[in-house]
Image (cartoon, rainbow, N blue to C red):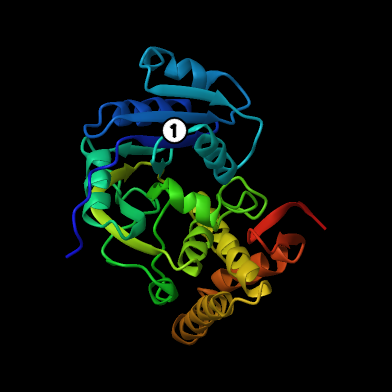
């Protein structure tokens, strides 16, 4: 068992947001109610109006809350703005449609103290029982233990809705890829891309199931289907980037996911007459093809901002 080290002295939580004022206010209130180490909360508002700022007005008297307006677009760009403005040695990410458990930050701090070898910790994201059967929202049970390319091959993807990393991890790995992630030109894929870059640096990633947030962003019907296509499109783009850089992990993961959805489509076609799953393979492939429109900086392993 690794030796215990002192808990972190300062935590910085970054919350990017755009156009979800009511969700945002409740999210930030839940974070400000957290126990544990000293912390700051940085809200990066990409909204086109002032409603989010107005919703936070009752909370802005709390000196721990810092509100920033940004002309950037995309969740990864918002996180990068917040990280650049942060002061903590531990950097924590969540989304504006999540609610933090009261001991959320305390759990992360304790987990890092217990695992000094951890560069990144992945918390649990769950759907409240009252919402679980009303539609779809991304969740993550945080039951893997330690992450590897093999766990990614099996489809285990932690969420930046509940992710914590040491500042030195960012110093070594770099920031999130702004072409990826919700609101970015490649729609999604920020999490697997970042985690793959962490592993490529030889750093270690663990689950921290005690650090919990609930996810309230339920999607139904067409919105649910569109969200899944975005997830797979972005994942295809993320894996294609690493494949283009000559990383065998990128080829392996992209091939694994394409094979899974293609086999699923064939099985369903034989069983039901409908190739359910083919749209997943198509979205992955479309994302990989879209990757080709973007140049890549080989040093940082990030997409460049302008497409060809």
Along the horizontal axis of the image, is 24 left or right of 293?
A: left
Q: Is residue 140 visible?
A: yes
Q: Is residue 151 above or below residue 103?
A: below
Which quarter of the figure has residue 302? bottom right
Residue 152 drawn above or below residue 269: above
Q: Which quarter of the rendered picture does the C terminus lie within?
A: bottom right
- Residue 244, image x, y percentages: 68, 73
Return the x and y of residue 42 as percentages of the image width and height.
45, 30
Query: Where the N terminus falls, by quadrant?
Result: bottom left
Q: Nearer the viewer, residue 30 or 281?
A: 30
Residue at the farthest left position: 1
* Farthest residue, direction right: 308
Q: Horizontal and vertical percent for residue 47?
A: 59, 28
Query: Relative to the observer, which residue lies in front, 198 or 55?
Result: 198
Instruction: Name the one closer to the observer, 251 or 268.
Output: 251
Q: Residue at x 38, y 17 (%)?
A: 63
Residue 54 x/y as whole percent: 49, 15
Q: Residue at left 66%, top 72%?
A: 245
> Residue 255, relative to residue 103: is it above or below?
below
- Secondary structure under badge 1? loop
**Label 1 crowd bin: few (<14), some (14–19), many (20+), radius 10 Å:** some
Can residue 220 be seen here?
no
Asked if residue 179 lies left or right of residue 65, the reply is right
Task: State the residue in front, 28 or 207.
Answer: 207
Callout count: 1
Is 257 above or below relative to 223? Answer: below
Q: Residue at label 1? A: 87
Q: Residue at x 71, y 61 (%)?
A: 296
């Amino acid at each position: 068992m690794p030796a215990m080290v002192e808990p972190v002295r300062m935590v910085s939580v970054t919350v990017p947001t755009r156009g979800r004022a009511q969700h945002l206010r409740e999210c930030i209130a839940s974070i400000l109610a957290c126990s544990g180490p000293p912390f700051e909360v940085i809200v990066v508002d990409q909204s086109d109006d002032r409603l989010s700022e107005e919703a936070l007005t009752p909370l802005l008297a709390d000196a721990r809350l810092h509100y920033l307006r940004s002309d950037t677009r995309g969740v990864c760009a918002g996180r990068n703005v917040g990280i650049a403005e942060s002061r903590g040695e531990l950097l924590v990410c969540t989304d504006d449609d999540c609610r933090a458990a009261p001991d959320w930050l305390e759990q992360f701090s304790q987990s890092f103290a217990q695992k000094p070898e951890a560069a990144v910790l992945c918390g649990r994201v769950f759907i409240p029982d009252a919402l679980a059967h009303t539609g779809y929202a991304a969740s993550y049970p945080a039951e893997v233990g330690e992450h590897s390319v093999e766990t990614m091959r099996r489809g285990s993807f932690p969420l930046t809705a509940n992710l914590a990393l040491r500042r030195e991890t960012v110093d070594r790995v770099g920031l999130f890829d702004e072409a990826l992630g919700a609101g970015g030109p490649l729609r999604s894929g920020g999490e697997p891309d970042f985690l793959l870059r962490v592993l490529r640096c030889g750093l270690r990633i663990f689950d921290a199931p005690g650090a919990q947030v609930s996810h309230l962003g339920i999607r139904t019907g067409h919105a649910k289907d569109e969200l899944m296509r975005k997830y797979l499109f972005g994942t295809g783009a993320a894996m294609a980037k690493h494949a283009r850089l000559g990383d065998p992990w990128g080829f392996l993961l992209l091939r694994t996911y394409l094979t899974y959805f293609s086999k699923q489509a064939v099985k369903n076609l034989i069983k039901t007459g409908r190739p359910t799953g083919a749209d997943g393979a198509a979205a992955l492939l479309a994302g990989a093809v879209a990757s080709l429109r973007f140049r890549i900086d080989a040093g940082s392993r990030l997409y460049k901002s302008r497409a060809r």
